[in-house]
Amino acid sequence: MEISQKKKKKKSSWVINNQLSCKNVDLLTNQYPNFNITPYSSYKLHISHKQNINILKNKAMEHSLIILLFTVLVLLTTTPGTLSQPSPAVAPTPPGPTNVTKILEKAGQFTVFIRLLKSTGVANQLYGQLKNSDNGITIFAPSDSSFSGLKAGTLNSLTDEQQVELIQFHVIPSYVSSSNFQTISNPLRTQAGDSADGHFPLNVTTSGNTVNITTGVTNTTVSGNVYSDGQLAVYQVDKVLLPQQVFDPRPPAPAPAPSVSKSKKKKEDSDSSGDDTPADASFASRNVGSLRDAVSFCFMSALLGWFYL
């Protein structure tokens, strides 16, 4: 049996050019398992390769999927909805308050002062003030060499409360620019508290471009501007600022002599007059008794004279 191959519309087909009966299709199917054999006419058969058919089916399926995905994409981009709407822009997070310790670390030479700020808890206080207040803060920061100039054991001799007061004494609870030192009012009130003499007074004066600071114990100058941003000002000082209340406590003032009040004096006078009253009463009673005796004597004498007459 001779089989001729004929291509039509780019599809594989086979036509048998003889008078083969269609009853023998089963025989051909078993003999050619890779072909699809179907009757074409009473004397011809249509033969196609199974692999080509599967390839066409797969391609058709791929084309269908591509068309389906493209349709879905078009619907998503053209239909109004939450998916097609652009996401709102996220507002930028406002910057937090200035970190004092980081500024000092960046400046260098303030290791001891940074350690004391952290150990006393003053660093956290400053962070909260800068976050919640608009008054600002001014810090006089002693350098490491300033602490080296203290007597040995000075810091260790202080109680925890005194260390807090020492560090707070270097902080003014308001922003002071370098130009404001010329017109500032003394004494300055620091974070340590009362600025009265003998407690925590801090006086600032200027001479030309020099800023002088005195505490009653320490006299020093501002040697540099470390940082300034309109809310926080940090100035370097050449010495540690020692407050009077911690390093030169004043003896308490003597109590004033008690003064005798008018009410107390009047009471004493009334008491003294009350003390004289019994003596006067006894003297009057004696006088009355003598008079009574004299009257009785006269009456008895008159009675006896009348009797004898």
Image (cartoon, helix red, strand yellow):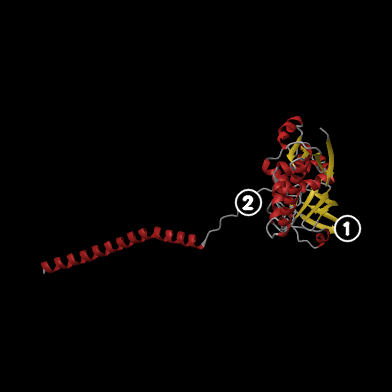
SS category of the residue bearing label 1: loop
Q: Earlier in the sequence, mark 1 or mark 2?
A: 1
CA distance for labels 1 and 2: 43 Å
Q: Quadrant of residue 136?
A: bottom right
SS category of the residue bearing label 2: loop
Give 40 or 153, whichever is nearer the viewer: 40
The amino acid pointed to by label 1 is: Asn
Disc 2: CA contacts within 10 A as few (<14), some (14-19) or many (>=20): few
> Which residue lies at the image location 43% right of the left edge and 61% below the top edge?
270
The amino acid pointed to by label 2 is: Pro
Q: Where, quadrant-wise, is the N terminus in this rendering?
A: top right
Q: Which mark is residue 254?
A: 2
Q: Nearer the viewer, mark 1 or mark 2?
A: 1
Q: Which mark is residue 209?
A: 1
Give 280 or 152, whichever is nearer the viewer: 152
Q: Is residue 87 visible?
A: no
